[in-house]
């Protein structure tokens, strides 16, 4: 009988679950695990034990209430500000302490009796409960002291002074009325001590290296100066209504244009050519304005001369230059020009009595009667033209536009000359009229 071959003995493989279960039969492992669990439990209990381990609360506001005496003196607290906060630790009943938030408490000075005048005061801080909760107390405050800055409040408005010399202008062909800002003044508020140091306000600006030939606009920050011209850097307690302005340096092209007189009540047949009829001094002026506007301008007009003010001895007038187009500026030294009519030696005057009246603009429901039956007027013209005139050629037009009430009064009269187109009436006239209801 053959002997059977013996096979080596094999052990079953341990699974991960089996190895983990085996650890709990290891005394050393169980001891370490027990210590760790005990420590975790201790930490958890200690964290919630606000009796022995105070709770820290951050971002607690600081409230400073000055004494009545200090407030009567106009003192205002500038530091701490509304955004200044501290950290506080509190202890007490765990259920109560865990409900406390930063809004439930505040920090106040232990005393403000020493604050009696503007200045800086270092004060000790203490906690204050402003909630309905109790059963807790303040342990520590971080920081425990604060420097309180007090002063009287001041508020002033300052004009914004632009520098006299900014960018250079190419004056050979351009004009600038100077820089302008979109805001003329700034209001500055803050501690009286700091506001009173400010003498004037200007801008921070550096001129370019080349002369300007077109309008330039920039944003410029405001700069504060004391009376000695030194720059003031304001503290964060100072507030300004604006911190910068938009500055425009307007640059316009220049142009020389003719000055031309105008006339009213000019006889229809009378030609007023500048070379032969009159002279103008100055005959030209220099103006500046937008390029597109200047391209359409070759002359500027004077205020109209009324022919009723012209006769053989009164033939020179100083007239204002009429309003220029929008955006244009008169660069000449004067705003008037002298107009002198030529050839007045060719004219003469004659007084003619007229009886021919017409009525204009009589109010509705009214009757107008002439009290003046005749009117002597001065007619100006060449002797040959005046010789052909009679009272039948001349009409006195009475205007009732400004006569509205019943009764007798004076009304303005305009003289109209028919037939001859080269004569005119000199002077102003009125006639007595009576207005009555129909």
Image (cartoon, helix red, strand yellow):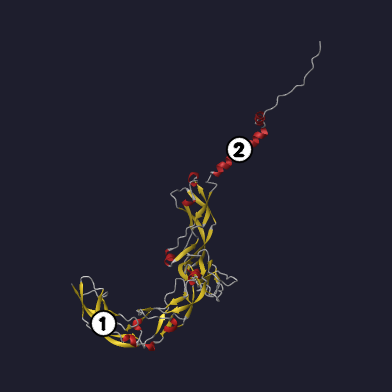
The residue shown at (81%, 12%) is 2
Give 413 or 333, whichever is nearer the viewer: 413
Give 58 or 31, whichever is nearer the viewer: 58
26 w.r.t. 86: above or below: above
Q: Which mark is residue 309?
A: none
Q: Is residue 289 left or right of residue 26?
A: left
Residue that lies at the very extreme toward the right in this rendered image: 2
Q: Position of residue 203 (x, y in %)?
A: 53, 69
Q: Is residue 62 left or right of residue 382?
A: right
Give 385 or 198, whichever is nearer the viewer: 385
Q: Quadrant of the N terminus?
A: top right
Give 52 or 319, whichever is nearer the viewer: 319
Q: Position of residue 427 (x, y in %)?
A: 31, 84
Residue holding disc 1: 392
400 w.r.t. 110: above or below: below
Q: Secondary structure at mark 1?
A: helix
Q: Position of residue 344 (x, y in %)?
A: 38, 87
Residue holding disc 2: 37
């Amino acid at each position: 009988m053959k002997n059977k071959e013996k096979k080596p003995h094999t052990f079953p493989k341990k699974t991960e679950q089996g190895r983990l279960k085996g650890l709990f039969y290891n005394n050393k492992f169980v001891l370490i695990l027990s210590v760790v669990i005990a420590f975790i439990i201790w930490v958890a209990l200690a964290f919630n034990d606000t009796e022995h381990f105070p709770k820290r609360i951050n971002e607690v506001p600081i409230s400073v209430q000055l004494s009545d005496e200090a407030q009567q003196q106009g003192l205002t607290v500038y530091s701490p500000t509304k955004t200044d906060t501290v950290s506080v630790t509190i202890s007490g009943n765990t259920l109560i302490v865990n409900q406390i938030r930063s809004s439930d408490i505040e920090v106040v000075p232990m005393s403000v009796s020493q604050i009696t005048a503007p200045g800086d005061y270092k004060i000790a801080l203490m906690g204050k409960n402003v909630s309905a909760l109790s059963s807790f107390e303040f342990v520590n405050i971080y920081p425990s002291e604060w420097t309180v800055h007090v002063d009287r409040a001041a508020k002033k408005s300052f004009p914004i002074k632009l520098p006299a010399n900014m960018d250079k202008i190419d004056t050979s062909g351009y004009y600038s009325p100077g820089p302008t800002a979109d805001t003329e003044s700034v209001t500055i508020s803050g501690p009286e001590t700091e506001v009173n140091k400010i003498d004037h306000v200007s801008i921070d600006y550096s001129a370019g290296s080349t002369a300007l030939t077109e309008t330039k606009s920039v944003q410029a920050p405001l700069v504060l100066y004391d009376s000695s011209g030194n720059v003031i850097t304001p503290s964060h307690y100072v507030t300004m209504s604006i911190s910068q302005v938009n500055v425009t340096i307007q640059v316009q092209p220049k142009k020389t244009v003719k000055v031309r007189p105008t006339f009213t009540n000019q006889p229809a047949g009378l030609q007023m050519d500048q070379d032969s009829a009159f002279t103008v001094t100055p005959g030209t002026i220099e103006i500046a304005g937008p390029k597109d506007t200047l391209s359409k301008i070759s002359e500027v007009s004077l205020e109209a001369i009324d022919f009723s003010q012209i006769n053989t001895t009164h033939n020179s007038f100083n007239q204002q230059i009429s309003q220029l187009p929008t955006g244009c500026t008169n660069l000449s030294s004067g705003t008037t020009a002298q107009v002198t009519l030529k050839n007045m030696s060719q004219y003469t005057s004659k007084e003619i009595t007229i009886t021919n009246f017409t009525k204009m603009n009589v109010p509705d429901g009214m009757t107008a009667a002439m009290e003046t039956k005749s009117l002597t007027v001065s007619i100006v013209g060449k002797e040959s033209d005046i010789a052909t005139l009679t009272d039948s050629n001349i009409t006195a037009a009475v205007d009732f536009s400004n006569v509205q009430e019943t009764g007798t009064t004076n009304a303005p009269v305009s003289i109209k000359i028919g037939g001859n187109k080269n004569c005119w009436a000199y002077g102003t006239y009125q006639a007595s009229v009576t207005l009555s209801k129909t």
